[in-house]
Amino acid sequence: MKRRLYTYLFLLVLLMVSSLMFAAAPDTVAVIPFNDNVISTGEAIALSDILENRLAKFGSFNLVERKAIENIMEELNFSTTDFVDQETAVKAGKMLSSQWLIMGSVSKLGNEYSMNVKLVNTETGRIVTGAYGESKSISGLKDDVESIAKELSQYLFAPFTNGIEFSALTMVYDMEFQSFGAKASFVMKYDELISLGVYGVVLRKNIDGEFGFDLGGKVIFGDPRKQALSLSIGALPSIGVYFRNITLDFYPTMLLGVEDSFGISVGVMLEQ
């Protein structure tokens, strides 16, 4: 009965992993109308529209419609100047279900206009990169938008290269926690769709307090910064899923001869 229960649990986890893989979707980006302190509202909207159009040319992601942004601004009683406040901008970004927020502002010093654009991660609230342009006229700033869009796109679509993963792991036997431990992995990109890695696991048995150490290898299908599937081999083989650098691994030891047992680990991938 227990073996059947664990088998069903394994199949359920496998189904969840498969669902995540097929549900993978491009990131969503919201371009907020530029701050209109020193330029007219029409000019601010025009600059942000041009940036949005150029972004669409450089990458494959979902852009939030301008009407949806305007509705959120109206609902929260925001103006473009409010988006200078990063915390407020992130709040709006989350309401728009957007993983990325692009905010821009134009300032003037003497006869020179300068344009600053920031890319904000709405999940962390962190400014991850920025771009800059300057000109003696507003129309001149439009010429910088192309290079700014390209620079931001290169960050958004920079390929995964390598990372270090840390996980907390527990093994269950006969519905009791048998051992606890930690797992560390190093992963490096192999090609566009596959990354290869090695891992080490340290486990402490609850029964006698002894420590064990195991090594193995893994292969990742997809981008672990978004959604990906992983398979590990070694003393503790597992199947896992990545979702935005968070990883969940399932160890079906009950299918490998150890009855009434399984393991689970949860961790995070730190991109290098």
Image (cartoon, rainbow, N blue to C red):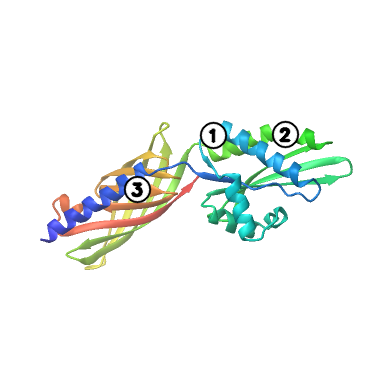
User: Which kind of residue does numbered mark 2 sit on?
Assistant: Asp
Q: Find residue 6 and report its horizontal and vertical position in percent.
A: 18, 57
Label 2 crowd (10 A; few <14 / some 14-19 / many >=20): some
**Badge 3 local density, few (<14 within 10 Å), some, or many (20+)?**
many
The quadrant in which the N terminus is found is bottom left
Total number of numbered labels? 3
Q: Which mark is residue 241?
A: 3
Q: Earlier in the sequence, mark 1 or mark 3?
A: 1
For the point 61% across and 45% down, the residue is: 66
Q: Name the residue beneath numbered marker 2.
A: 144
Q: Position of residue 106 (x, y in %)?
A: 76, 45
Tag 3's secondary structure?
Answer: strand
- Between tags 1 and 3, which lies in front? 1
* Residue 259 in view in this figure: no
Please state the horizontal and vertical placement of residue 104, each as a whole percent of the image: 69, 46
Q: Which amino acid, by three-letter code, is at mark 1?
A: Gly
- Residue, disc 1: 59
Viewer-proximal residue among 42 and 252: 42
Q: Amino acid at mark 3?
A: Val
